[in-house]
Image: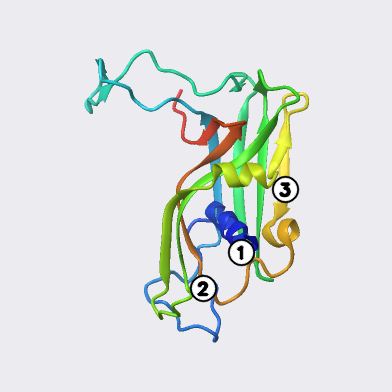
Amino acid sequence: MRRIVGAIFCSMVGSLLLGSVAFAVRPGEPKKANKVQLTLARNWADQGVANDTTTGSLTLPAHHPAATTDACAFDPALGGGKLSASVTGTPDIKFAIKLAGVTNCEGQNLCLAATIKLTTQGCTSADPMGCTAGPTSFDAILSAANLCCTVAGGKCTLATSANAAFGAGVITAGSQINAQILDSGVTHGSNRAFSSALFVP
């Protein structure tokens, strides 16, 4: 379970390569891909039965009205949020959540969330090409591990690392971990409150 949770944190760093003589080097990986920073926006429910169409030069089937997935929101004048993660040389992965101007969630816990596809050399088969797991949603596991912050004065911050949170050796050199981020954000209970996104005003 310790190693599984360690792998979860890799979801916040995208593709990365940690080299070691203990494993054959998996071909085609980059020299460096060691930092990810994502902005957050309110999460909206997936499209229902299409009853609308987007306007502009690119039209897409849509559903109205747009529906939020949680009561937590951002104050449009003050609100915003970021998720970040980076690889350190120990090796380790440090990560952070920083939210401000959060409304309708005072005193509530908001937790790290991610869906990833993980490729690693740490496989029982010892296949020199490694193995791939996922895509898998780790929202519930991250919440159960209490990787959360509490909203106070509209702010919510979390800063730690994989090895600090779960003990030295969760992230180890040589595993050549490539964590493809398919989705990431913050949950409020069982709901996704905020997701990594771009917002064009």
* CB under 8 Å between discs 3 and 2: no
Circle 1: element type: helix
Amino acid carrying mark 2 in the image = Gly
Residue 56 percent location from the top left of the image? 25, 22
Q: Position of residue 21 (x, y in %)?
A: 54, 86
Calculate the distance from the C-alpha at mark 1 to the C-alpha at mark 2: 10 Å
Circle 1 Cα neighbour tier, 10 Å, few/some/many (<14 / 14–19 / ≥20): few
Q: Residue at x 47, y 36 (%)?
A: 197
Earlier-in-chain disc, 1 versus 2: 1
Q: Which mark is residue 37?
A: none
**Residue drawn at point x = 51 percent, y = 64 percent:** 16
Q: Is residue 186 left or right of residue 163?
A: left
Q: Residue at x 59, y 34 (%)?
A: 187
- Residue 27, quarter of picture: bottom left
Q: Secondary structure at mark 3?
A: strand
Q: State the colouring used for the structure image.
A: rainbow
Q: Which residue is mark 1?
A: 3
- Residue at the spot of label 2: 122
Residue that badge 3 annotates: 159
- At which x and y percent is residue 185? 55, 39
Which residue is nearer to you in this view: 78 or 19?
19
Q: Secondary structure at mark 2?
A: loop
Going by the numbered disc 3, the residue's amino acid type is: Ala
Q: Is 31 located above or below residue 53 in the figure?
A: below
